[in-house]
Amino acid sequence: MLRVLIVLVPLALSIYAFIDCVTTQEKDVRFMPKPVWALLILLFPLVGSISWLIIGRDRATSQRMGSASGGQWVAPDDNPEFLKSLKDDKPDAPEPVEDDDTHLRDWEADLRRREEELKRRENGEEPKD
């Protein structure tokens, strides 16, 4: 079990550091260009990964950019413009039925009429118009 951890931990650390390096904006990278950091992580997985995580990225800048400013994508539920548009676009309420009992009686009468027409057709009679 220990042998597996000796292999998996540095591998996971290297994968994480490489993905973090590739997805980091160029302005947040310190000391060396981004491609050099990526090569360092790939060629020297343990040393390169730890170096990248400690000194390669400007963490203070990335934490400040966590807000909705800077033109970054914002989830709809956090976007004030989207929330305002929801308040402006209220859906129309369905038209109320004037009298539910009347509406139900009309519907039942129509249903009875259709059933009678269907029975007449089955018996071969001419439908009444």
Image (cartoon, rainbow, N blue to C red):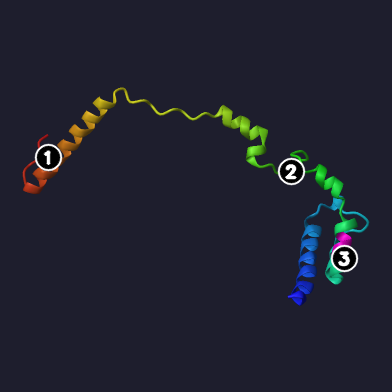
Confirm whether residue 54 shows in the render: yes
Estimate the spatial distance between the alpha carbons at disc 2 and disc 3, rounded to whole Å: 29 Å
- For the residue carrying disc 2, how many other residues have a C-alpha within 10 Å: few (<14), some (14-19), or many (20+)? few
Q: In the picture, which quadrant includes the N terminus?
A: bottom right
Q: Residue at x 31, y 22 (%)?
A: 98
Verify whether residue 48 appears in magenta.
yes
- Res. 72 mark: 2
Q: Amino acid at mark 3?
A: Gly
Residue 40 in view of the camera: no
Q: Do the residues under discs 1 and 2 have CB atoms within 8 angstroms?
A: no
- In this image, 52 relative to 104: left or right? right
Dot 1 falls on a residue whose secondary structure is helix
Q: Name the residue carrying label 1.
A: 116
Residues at marks 1 and 3, CA–CA distance in whole angstroms: 85 Å
Q: Is residue 78 left or right of residue 69?
A: left
**Which three-letter amino acid code belongs to the residue tagged 2?**
Gln
Q: Which residue occupies 89% across, 61% down?
A: 51
Q: Position of residue 7 (x, y in %)?
A: 78, 74
